[in-house]
Amino acid sequence: MSKMTAEPRKKEGNRRRISMYISWSYPAESNRELYELNNRYSTMWEVRRSRYPQYEAMAGNPDTFKQGIDGTLELFMRDWQDFRVPMSELTGHPVPLVQRIDHGGYSSALTDQLLSDIDTLILISLDHQLTHQAPTQEEIDAVQKWLRRDGTCLILCPHHEVGASEDAAVREIEFKHHGDGLVGREQRFGGFGRALMKGLGIPVENKFGLNPARDAEGRRPAPLSVAKDLDEPGWLQGVPTFNVHPHLPHFAITTTDQNAVKVLARQPINTARPHPFVEAGNKEFNALLWLPPNGKRAGDVLIGDATLWAYTFGGRSSLTRFWQNIATM
C-alpha cells in the first residue's frame, strides 16, 4: 500500500465492509538472514524443493516469480485472493489488504481514518515476534473507539508459537509432533496480535503449534467440536471443519471469568504424535473464540488462526461457508 488512498467505502444497508490488515513488516520478514534456521519464513525455493512438484508451474521460473523469502510472502498474497474476491462479490464492496509496513517501506497504522469505513476487520498477525511489531497506545485507543460503534467485528488471527520452551528436548518433541521440515525448532508468531489483545484487555494467548487430526481417510480435517448453544450469532452454522495446516495454535484463555470468552470450536489433535499439551491430557485445542459485546464494547471480537482465510490447507467448502457467515452477519 503506497501513500495513495482509495475512496472510502460508503455504508449501504447490511452489506459489510471487510478489510484485511497484515501486521508484519514486509522488509523485516523478507530480509531475514538465510543462515538463520529459526524464526524466519522459508524461501520460495525451499518451499518448491519441499513440496515438489506442487509449485513448479507457478513459481519454478526465477524470471517470473521471486525465489527468496519475498516469494513466499507473495504466495500468501495470492492465497488471500481466494477470500478477497468472492467476499467482494458477496458484499458489493472491495476487500482491501493493508500491510503494516509494505514492500516499499510505507507504514499503515490502525488509525481512526483507516477504521472509518470498516465493519469487519480481519487482523492477521503473521509477524515473527523478534521483528517487534506492536501497536502504539494511540492505535489501541483507535481500535477501542471503533469497537464502541454498533455492528463492528474484530477478528484477531495470531498464528502459532512453536518452540517457546527453553528446553531443547521439548522443542525437538514439538518439531516431531508437527513434522513440517520448513519450520525450525523455534518459530514464534503473533507479536502484534498478542500486544493488541493485551492492550484491549483480551485474556487470550496463542500457544504451541499443534498437528490437527484428520478424518478416517487421512485427507480432510477431523470435525470440529462446536458449542452450538454458545454460538448465538451463528458464526459456525454449516461449518463442520476448518483446515489441516500442520501446526495450529491453541488459544489459551488466561482468566477464570467464564463469561469473558466463549469457546465456540475446539479442533481435535493428532494424538498419535507426542506433544506436551497432549501429554497433559488434552485431545483438542481451542480453535475459535468469541467475546460478545459488553458494557464497554458494542462490537464482537473473534479469535482464530491466520490460516482460516485461504484454501491452502484444505477444508474448502467448510471455509467458504464460514466466510459467508462472517460476511453476512
Image (tube, rainbow, N blue to C red):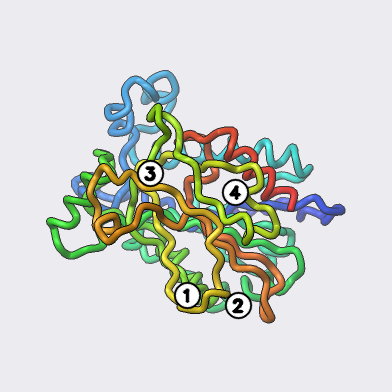
At a point 64% along the width and 40% down the height, the residue shown is 321
Q: Distance between the residues labelled 4 and 2?
A: 22 Å
- Residue 128 visible? The answer is yes
Do the numbered discs 4 and 2 sit on residues whose CB atoms are within 8 Å?
A: no
Which amino acid does the dot numbered 3 rest on? Answer: Pro
SS type, badge 1? helix
Pointers 4 and 3 in contact (CB under 8 A)? no
- What amino acid type should be assigned to the residue bearing mark 4? Leu
* Residue 112 as seen in the image, left or right of residue 122: right
SS at circle 3? loop
The image quadrant that residue 289 belongs to is bottom right
Residue kind at label 2, given as amino acid type: Asp
Farthest residue, direction left: 169
Mark 3, Cα crowd under 10 Å, few <14 / some 14-19 / many 20+, is: many
Horizontally, is 191 left or right of 295 in the view? left
**Residue 321 vs residue 201, the one in the foreground:** 321
- The kind of residue on which mark 1 rests is Lys
Q: Which of marks 3 and 1 is nearer the N terminus?
A: 1
Name the residue: 49% across, 41% down: 223
In this rendering, the label closer to the viewer, 2 or 3: 3
What separation in Å lies between label 2 and label 3 (alpha carbons)?
36 Å
Q: In this view, does 11 lie to the left or right of 238?
A: right
Disc 2 target residue: 141
Circle number at residue 97: 4
Q: Residue tagged by mark 1?
A: 198
Q: Are marks 3 and 1 in contact (CB under 8 Å)?
A: no
* Above or below 261: residue 75: above
Secondary structure type for disc 4: strand
